[in-house]
Amino acid sequence: ADRLAGLYSQYLVYRRDWLLRWERDERSGFAVAGHWQGELWRRIVLDIGQGHRAQRMNDLLAALPRMSADPDQPALHVFGHSHLPRDILLALRQLARSRLVNIYFPDPCRELWEDLRQQRTHYLAGDEGPFLQLAQPLLASLGRLGQHHALLLNSLDAHDDDRDLRDREAREQPHDGLLQRLQNAIRTLQPTWSAQSDEALLADDSLRIHACHTRLRELEVLKDVLLDQLARHRDLQPRQIVVMAPNMAAYAPLIPAVFGQAGRSGGLLPYHLADVSLGRTHPLLTAFMQLLDLPGERISRSQVLALLGLPAVMRRLGLDESQLAAIERWLVRSQVAWGLDGPMKADFGAAPVADNSFAFGFDRMASGFLLGQVPPEQLLDGMLPAAPVAGPDAQALGPLWALLELLADWRAQCAHPRRLSEWSWSLQDWIERLFQADWQDDEEQSALAALDRAVMALRVESEQAGCDPEVEWPVVQQALLQSLETVPERQAFLAGGMTFCGMVPQRAIPFEVVALLGLN
């Protein structure tokens, strides 16, 4: 249902004509191929009983021509966009009948390139001549969005301002760098550019491509290249560098390992992350996303230790670094591997015995605490006590038991369907028992508040919908994951230091150095 809602939202913006035809039950063109979508759309419109964007856009386009012209109205300037839907352009054209409307379109090419086609298009059409003489293949393959927008603009019969073409008469400047030569070839619609000598290419650092075998290696090479750039260009500042990737979420966990923690001003390469999902903005949120998989996880020793090592968890359970290290030693000596207890191990196809589970290990640790140092042959109810469990660190047994009890409670409740409001209250209880934010750490407090809002939204949406259905845990899990994997609409950009962000159009305008990860 959520995916269909997103699809219809796109139709409302880009395919208003389809929706209106479906409402009139016209079965022509696409309406035949997508008849089930049309039938569903008609039912949605009847059920909601309110006007929608496509109808309001029709009313707007009909009302705009009736507006009287007012010469005193200020001009409307539209800029900062890479494309606009056709309906928006039609509305701007109608608005231009009553006032001046200026649309600023950043065009990489000074020539007319609207008819430029991809090599694949020429090849499939059997058009061998133009295929062999294709002008500027990069512009043809990577500029389709701008090309379509230029075609839409030309279809509006608008007045073209030729001031952007004045560089035709401008004196050509020498283009020594490889990047400058490529930019000039795109600007002038030339398929190739004059080659440099081997010596000049080796000294040219304006455009470089590095072949790396892993994402981690990409980041390591990137760090070396950026340090070299800063050393060679003394006036270059980290804030003038942008690093983009098609999927920054794939690199986000690796970046701190190479560049250190984000947001820190010290060091040669300070940076911040943008265009990343909410769940990637703080380790607390990342840990909670991993906990959402708890019912289907084996719950290994490493997973529990990683959770215990989270500062917000240590703060809530009252652990310090010494006690955390003691817990790790005890779990290793007690030979804890995975599973909360024997019945849980049976759920994963193993023998229903407690050996090497957390229940088995905790019993050994508790026995060692009660009996102290005992001879190896002395057993307690057939169990060898773990030793030594003594001293101030022995107080860590309480926090460890509290965490294991919470995980067992979480897993048990996820085995049965519950009402959405009940899930929301239980999740808030688990969060309260597990995390405590540092009152001096604004980022951690913001992360915990965002987590509370995501969980509370389950209950709020249920109340707004007027129903509180019983749902299985995977439904709740998917809803929370979707909320935490959404990129916030407002994120810090140009916040000091280098910027790691997604490949969003026009993001590279303010930067002197642009690096691209994930070219494969």
Image (cartoon, rainbow, N blue to C red):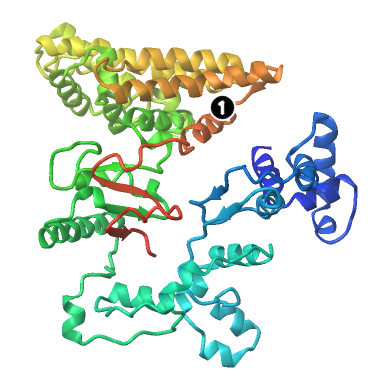
Residue 50, image quadrant = top right
Is 220 in front, or is 105? 105
Q: Nearer the viewer, residue 382 or 183?
A: 183
Question: In the rendered view, would you say 74 is above or below 413?
Answer: below
The answer to whether residue 63 of the structure is visible from this angle is yes
Is 282 left or right of 387, judged from the image as shown?
right
Q: Residue at x 38, y 29 (%)?
A: 285
Q: Nearer the viewer, residue 235 or 40?
A: 235
In percent of width and height, residue 308 lies at 27, 23
Q: Give left or right: position of 173 versus 409.
A: left
Residue found 52% across the figure and 35% down from its top: 482
Give the percent coordinates (x, y) of residue 114. Answer: 59, 73
Which residue is most to the bottom?
Answer: 129
Q: Which residue is mark 1?
A: 476
Nearer to the camera, 69 or 151? 69
Q: Residues within 10 Å of mark 1 (few under 14, many from 20)?
A: some
- Count of picture labels: 1
| Residue 351 appears in the figure | no
Q: Is residue 211 left or right of residue 50?
A: left
Image quadrant in which the C terminus is located: bottom left
Residue 451 against residue 490 in the figure, above or below: above
- Residue drawn 47% across and 68% down? 164
> Where is residue 339, by image quadrant?
top left
Name, please, the residue furthest toward the front: 72
Image quarter of the N terminus: top right
Q: Which residue shows up at 57% across the image and 54% down it?
A: 102
